[in-house]
Amino acid sequence: MKTIEKRLVHSLAEFLNVTAEIIEEWSSPEMGEAQPWYRGQMKAAWSLVPGEFRYENIDADELRTQFELKARPLLTSIPQNEWEWYFLMQHYGLPTRLLDWTTGSLIALHFALCHETGCHDAAVWVLDPWNLNTWSVGSPDLLLTTDEKLGEYLSPPYSKKRYPSKPVAVVPPYNSARITVQRGAFTVHGNDPRGIDQQFKKRLIQIVIPKDDAILMRRQLRNAGISEFTLFPELDGLCRDIRALYIEGC
């Protein structure tokens, strides 16, 4: 079986060059310029597995039910459908079958480097979501929450419906400031718990940042204007930003 292509970078400039090369390689006169999605992970060794499949014996239906029951009084706007609830769960850290992606390469790089910088080789994954959907659902179109095909990937809790096996790329509604600022996108897994990198390899590349270069690249990224407060424009993001600069030194 084909192995995942990996590319090594040691600086922000190299990272930008590699992402530009990937876009050029994936572009064509027929389809135009490629528009990859990116996902930053602080450990390069991690597979592209969503949270629900990282825990043993998790009761996903109970998690969804408890969240929907108890989150209502804390929300200023109530989600209108199951998908909006599901995105909200992911947004606030509960395990789902969703994986977060972004259309911004530097945003993904920040998420790869913002925690435990220098402790592990980090990685930014680069995905062609149109190619993924051609493989998984037979059409290159990115799915919206209103699409009938996407409806097969989420049903009400306890319905015991069996989902399709292959993951698909989804464009979420930009109904929160964070998703908008972070240029968010998602893939959603079906029943197959294996990582996307174990299932789909045609247009998926891993850019690896060696741990010895991580702190330098994080500083270069800050100088380029990408930091915690950029992506979390709230008090907690501001405080993490100040802490990173004045206490952690990057």
Image (cartoon, rainbow, N blue to C red):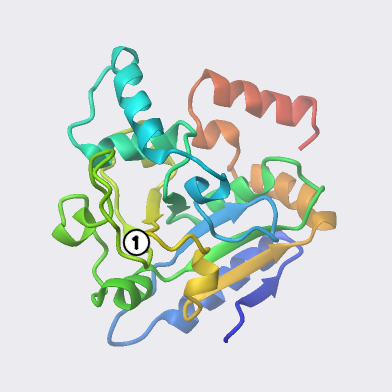
Q: Quadrant of residue 80?
A: top left
**Residue at image point 56% right, 21% down:** 236
**In this view of the protein, can residue 68 be seen by the observer?**
yes
Residue 29 coordinates in the image, percent (x, y)? 31, 87
Q: Residue furthest right?
A: 212
Q: Nearer the viewer, residue 33 or 127?
A: 127
Q: Is residue 190 left or right of residue 160?
A: right
Residue 237 coordinates in the image, percent (x, y)? 56, 26
Q: Residue furthest top?
A: 73
Badge 1 is on which residue? 169
Q: Is residue 7 left or right of residue 144?
A: right
Q: As displayed, is residue 156 above or below residue 152?
A: above
Residue 139 coordinates in the image, percent (x, y)? 23, 75
**Residue at image point 64% right, 26% down:** 240
Q: As displayed, is residue 57 above or below residue 68?
A: below
Image quadrant holding the N terminus, namely bottom right
Q: Nearer the viewer, residue 24 or 102?
A: 102
Image quadrant holding the C terminus, namely top right
Q: Quadrant of residue 117?
A: top right
**Residue at image point 29% right, 17% down:** 72
**In this view of the protein, can residue 223 be seen by the observer?**
no
Helix, strand or loop under label 1: strand
The amino acid on which the numbered mark 1 sits, given as a three-letter code, is: Ala
Residue 81 coordinates in the image, percent (x, y)? 19, 36
